[in-house]
């Protein structure tokens, strides 16, 4: 998905130039405004990954006010765009903990490189949160911590399921579809009526089987094999 950038800049010509630079670099513009008040109202209603804030905005409020609002209520990273560079000014803006600041006038490489650093970091943090999903499962031997980083695959055996993990095997009395619904791990794919695999441990996918850490798991076309292949390709 494209990263979304909001532009708070009082000069129409500059807003248009920034929009053009970002869109040509394959970013999505989530919105723009010339005043801090309008930007604040819109930012509360839309999804965005980064805000570019000019310090001097039209209206009664400046970029510092907008930054403080974002920090307090939205926690979205932002970069200042400013022509000021004095020590006193930098001390003021640094108190709002910006992700960065860009001195005006700036060129396209400067803008894009700064935006890319912040949006890439935000994306990695988001993916990390998804990858590190954790759930506690009641097994025959007690509660066991299962995460997307240690669960290799699930194997159904009638009314029991064997959880194959990095630490070992655990058995629970449950149906496979029920456990998958309980876990809600976005990296788990059911590939057979008796098996579900974690895409992060898949080594090889061939026509009728999947290799997961040395184990050959059968594939059924009626399940999510195509989706798994597509997801593995994205991962790489």
Image (spheres, rainbow, N blue to C red):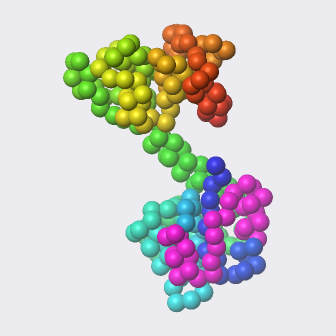
Considering every residue shown, the one lying at the far bottom of the view is 60
Vertical relation: 229 (above or below) 79:
above
Nearer to me, 109 or 142: 142
Left/right placement of residue 194 relative to residue 112 reads: left
Instruction: Tell me which segment is drawn in magenta.
Output: 17-45
Q: Quadrant of the C terminus?
A: top right
Quarter holding residue 10: bottom right
Left/right placement of residue 38 relative to residue 65 reads: right
Q: Residue at (62%, 59%) from the top-left corner? A: 4
Q: Position of residue 172 (x, y in %)?
A: 30, 20
Vertical relation: 80 (above or below) 26:
below
Q: Residue at (44%, 35%) from the top-left corner? A: 185
Quarter holding residue 139: top left
Nearer to me, 203 or 125: 203
- Residue 24 seen by the camera: yes
Q: Residue at (68%, 59%) from the top-left corner? A: 28
Left/right placement of residue 8 relative to residue 70 reads: right
30 magenta-colored:
yes
Q: How many marks?
A: 0
Q: Position of residue 36 (x, y in %)?
A: 54, 80
Left/right placement of residue 21 relative to residue 145 reads: right
128 magenta-colored:
no
Nearer to me, 136 or 7: 136
Vertical relation: 43 (above or below) 28:
below
Q: Position of residue 99 (x, y in %)?
A: 53, 61
- Residue 81 seen by the camera: no
Q: Residue at (55%, 48%) from the top-left corner? A: 123
């Amino acid at each position: 998905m494209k990263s979304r950038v909001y532009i708070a800049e009082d000069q129409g010509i500059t807003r248009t130039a920034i929009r053009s630079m970002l869109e040509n670099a394959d970013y999505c513009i989530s919105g723009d405004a010339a005043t801090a008040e309008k930007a604040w109202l819109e930012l509360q209603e839309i999804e965005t990954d980064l805000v570019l804030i000019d310090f001097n905005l039209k209206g009664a409020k400046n970029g510092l006010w907008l930054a403080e609002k974002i920090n307090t209520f939205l926690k979205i990273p932002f970069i200042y765009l400013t022509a000021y560079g004095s020590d006193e000014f930098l001390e003021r803006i640094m108190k709002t903990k910006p992700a960065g600041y860009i001195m005006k006038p700036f060129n396209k490489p400067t803008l894009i490189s700064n935006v890319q650093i912040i949006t890439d970091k935000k994306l990695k943090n988001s993916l990390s949160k998804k990858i590190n999903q954790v759930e506690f499962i009641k097994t025959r031997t007690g509660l066991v911590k299962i995460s997307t980083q240690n669960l290799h695959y699930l194997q159904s055996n009638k009314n029991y399921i064997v959880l194959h993990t990095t630490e070992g095997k655990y058995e629970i009395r449950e149906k496979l579809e029920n456990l998958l619904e309980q876990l809600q791990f976005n990296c788990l794919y059911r590939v057979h009526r008796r098996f579900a695999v974690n895409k992060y441990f898949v080594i090889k996918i061939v026509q009728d089987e999947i290799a997961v850490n040395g184990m050959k798991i059968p594939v059924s076309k009626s399940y999510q094999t195509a989706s798994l292949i597509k997801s593995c390709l994205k991962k790489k």
